[in-house]
Amino acid sequence: MNRSVPNGSASEVGSFFSALSEIIMRIVTVRRISQVFFLALFLWFCVATSFGIEWWQLRGWPVSWFLHLDPLVALSTLLTTGSLYRDLLWALVTLVLTVLLGRFFCSWVCPFGSLHHFVGYLGKRGKPFSSRVALNRYHRAQSIKYHILVVLLSAAAGALIAHQVREAVRPSIPLVALLAVTIGLAWSAAGRASERNGKTFIFLSAFIGIWALIASFVALDRMIAASLQTGLLDPIALVYRSINLVVLPLADSTMQRISVSQRYYEGAWLIGAVFLAALLLNLKVPRFYCRFVCPLGALYGILGRYALWRIGKKDGDCPQCALCEADCEGGCEPGGTMRLNECVLCMNCRDDCRHDIITYSSRPSAGGEITLPDLSRRGLVLSMASGIAAVPLLRLGGGLGANWNPSMIRPPGSLSEADFLSRCIKCGQCMRVCPTNIIHPAGLESGLEGLWTPILNFRLGTSGCQLNCIACSQVCPTAAIRPITLDEKKGIKDFAASGPVRLGMAFVDHGRCLPWAMDKPCIVCQENCPVSPKAIFVREVFNTVRSGVGVVAGSDGFTVELREPSLKPGRFGTGDYYLAISGGPGGNGDMRALIVSNSDRSLTLASGRPLEFLPSPGTQARIQVRLQRPQVDPERCIGCGVCEHECPVTGKRAIRVTAENESRSRKRSLLL
């Protein structure tokens, strides 16, 4: 039987597979596959951050890997601390690839960029060609992201630069004079410099020089401080925070598969609003956040100018059809003079060009290139000054000094507050992994500087901070919460001398505590205290209840009859009430017996503890409640918050934990 395919059919099959191969191998298709893969991987890591025993929960997955790839996180923490956390060395991979390939991360890896790309695609669907071209034109406001980057990095570097400049300059007065002359020459030369690169360099040099001159006479290092605020707008930290604290809790509110119980995060509405606004703005301008706000994109734009490979024209014979600009994701104008720093390597221009002019190669664009962002010297200097000045302004309230907020309790393993703020990028990883859901994003408790940093809220969640849990310290990408062991947290074995990690201390509010304020028996806090020996102990007292005084009519030792029927039947049979009779043979004080039941005028006593003597008729009888009033031992309390969470006073708890006595700060200790 002849199984050969007719020539016509063979030709059609060959054409089909050729076309299919061309579609598969299109660079845009490869980019889309990459976007889907990394977005799915990112979402998987967010789900896997959930604490539990399932294989898809926290089981050694590198859940913070995207943050470790972020060079803005690495650079900013390096500036604030002067050191680089080892896991952030992954950022070197991204830096090297950016210098080789260009700004690839934005369109090939970044999960937030992929979301912007998709929403922007939906927004421009069905729009005419001319409108799409107009939407993707370069706008001068795209330089805003570079100013944002300068402000954030200046805030991070303020203290480091001030200290280093002061140490370098102050000892040498002749050097100061020489520097002043150099500044004057540089300033005058700035007005005559014709090349933009030279102007920018001279102005930056002049600015730093003036700063150095001031620092030589004034102790700037005492006033200027460093603060890590890049996490507010860094796209990776922002998308981690939004997915972990908003999207996943909403998605899991009906399924209840990712978490054991519904998770709540105080102030999550603001995080969700920022996330939603960033996405919806793409309906107005494609990749709005990437073009106008993203500080990480600005950093990549600066690095991208040195890229060995780049998008551009391979010859100048371009018909100016604008096809390449209809779907340009970065607004880099590939049809004209290429704005290299704005190109996000989406490859749409190369794919859309019907004249085979747009190429990706190591040669400069034949149409010309603009490699620097559109920044004015005045704006650049103003941005630097604003970032440096912002930190001391934010700290004028004394939040890091005597005016610190005792209700702001940090997770176990947190660094001292100043060091913590120099490392925390507000990513929400610790909040997501906490099995009891007590770590929440801060509002203004620690001032604007501490917005969205992790604090503990013991009212929400399922319990306090569990003794056998150190999950938050294991996922922190910058070691703001340093990795600790269970032995260190409990203060055992090698850490016995230093004692357990203390988050704060519990205080009993006598005005709200049931045994203290209302004569109601309650020992819930003492029963639930997980410390051994318990940090909460009780002192026993007997108080006469209101309207609990009567006159004895008669008694047989096990039952006491009163003259007036003034009692509520069954009220005193709970095991907390006693009958007290004054006096006795020899006048030995009060005699008490446990009440097991009562009617409106009689009291039945426990059979094992009858009255030692029979009270005569007319003797005064008092009904007393046995109270166990809680006390807190400051040497044993670790501030775990279990007592606060379990307190039956459901509003403002009668026992509350504050940051006093926390082990991360000796200045906040209650004990000598």
Image (spheres, rainbow, N blue to C red):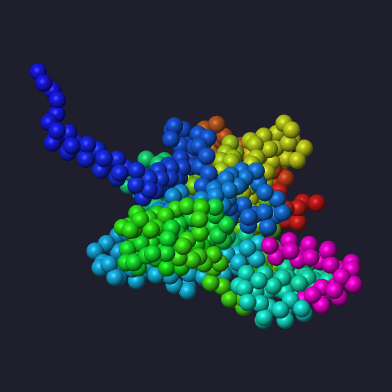
Whether residue 183 is visible: yes
- Residue 361 location, x and y as percent? 47, 52
- Asked which quadrant contains residue 204, the reply is bottom right
Foreground residue, 72 or 258?
A: 72
Residue 289 belongs to magenta span? no
Marker count (numbered): 0
Check the image and report above or below for 544 versus 124: above
- Residue 519 location, x and y as percent? 55, 54
Q: Residue at 70%, 50% (x, y): give it.
A: 83
Q: Residue at 63%, 50% (x, y): give it.
A: 480
Residue 172 belongs to magenta span? yes
- Residue 661 location, x and y as percent? 70, 52
Foreground residue, 460 or 553?
A: 460
Foreground residue, 113 or 205?
A: 205
Q: Residue at 62%, 69% (x, y): give it.
A: 197
Looking at the rendering, the stretch of residues picked out in magenta corresponds to 157-183
- Residue 62 location, x and y as percent? 52, 39
Check the image and report above or below for 21 versus 338: above
Whether residue 435 is visible: no
Residue at the farthest left position:
1
Q: Residue at 12%, 31% (x, y): give it.
A: 6
Q: Quadrant of the N terminus?
A: top left
From the viewer's perspective, tell me whether residue 448 is left or right of residue 15.
Answer: right
From the viewer's perspective, tell me whether residue 159 is left or right of residue 132.
Answer: right
From the viewer's perspective, tell me whether residue 217 is left or right of residue 430.
Answer: right
Main SS, magenta region, reads helix
Residue at the farthest top position:
1
